[in-house]
Image: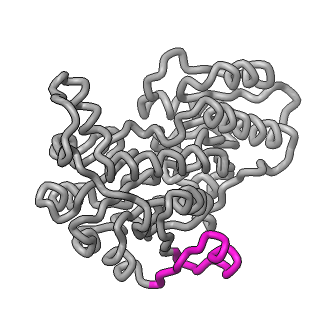
Amino acid sequence: MPSERLSVVVTRRLPEVVETRMTELFDVSLREDDTPMTREELVAAMQEADVLVPTIGDQIDAGMLGQAGPRLKLIANYGAGIDHVDVATARQRGILVSNTPGVLTDDTADMTMALILAVTRRIPEGLALMQSGAWQGWSPTALLGGRVGGKRLGILGMGRIGQAVARRARAFGMQIHYHNRHRLRSEIEQAHEATWWESLDQMVARMDVISINCPHTPSTFHLMNARRLKLMKPEAVIVNTSRGEVIDENALTRLLRAGEIAGAGLDVYEHGHDVNPRLRELGNVVLLPHMGSATREGRIEMGEKVLINIKTFADGHRPPDQVLPSML
């Protein structure tokens, strides 16, 4: 790499401490407002920079990579999810891709448990009642929810976050079940007191709560499709803090409206921020604006990983969090 400072373009506003450190280390173009870049702005950035720092909202496809300038050698993604970047095409064009794994495990697991409790105990309905001023006092039969202790939790994707969810759920007295492409080692299963289901269909049909904690890949797109959602017990609920594309959102909406699924807690959506309006109207659904990673500590740690990946690359070494097509 040349001895002068790397040219880095950042696509969104980052925590101030991260932006300050980037400015100290590199020749940085920061985003003045927090609106997403347009496709044209992203292409222009890729034509002028050595390093692009995008986020999950920046779709970087083969067509855009084909227009990248010869200087672009690293896409240092701010975030763990990487399905918005065409990693295979980037690699073919000699552009490395890195991400920020492992930083948000606890934050996302905390939000998963928050959604489980919010849906099963009808917390948003109680909040709305209080804010409207319509509460008339305690009633033996008002806003009855369900107890989570003793319930079966089925975790779809027992990676770092799935295991963190399992630890929290066990503290609430839930029974832990999971489905993975590959079974975990016996000592990990024993540590979580977790039961593996080779058949996702059989697990889904027997759980009280389903938690989606797997990444979005071609093989997980609509993994929870209409047929599989119909297998859920009518009194069961589903939560998703992973990727919206894993659930067929229209099918989920239909089943919730029909009372065939008791409730849902969602932090991610199939079409980004374009949420099905019928889903927003339902009282048995808790919708959050992708807040799973929204802690000050987590966002700063993400930035620190981005900095390390860029600095390591600038020093002529492989970024520690490089993403390869075979990993997807």
Indicate yes or no whether the magenta region holds residue 200.
no
State whether residue 269 appears in this view: no
- Name the quarter where the C terminus is drawn: bottom right
Q: 294 or 44, which lies in front?
A: 294
Q: How is the image coloured?
A: one colour
Q: Position of residue 69 (x, y in %)?
A: 61, 37
Q: 194 or 319, which lies in front?
A: 194
Q: Position of residue 5 (x, y in %)?
A: 81, 26
Q: Position of residue 183 (x, y in %)?
A: 58, 80
Where 283 sits versus 174, above or below? above
Q: Which of the 4 image quadrants contains residue 47? A: top right
The residue most toward the left is: 258
What range is drawn magenta here? 180-198
Residue at figure coordinates x 64%, y 42% from the top left:
75
Where 199 sits versus 242, above or below? below
Q: Position of residue 205 (x, y in %)?
A: 31, 77
Where 197 sits versus 143, above or below? below
State whether residue 309 appears in this view: yes
Q: Which of the 4 image quadrants contains residue 35? A: top left
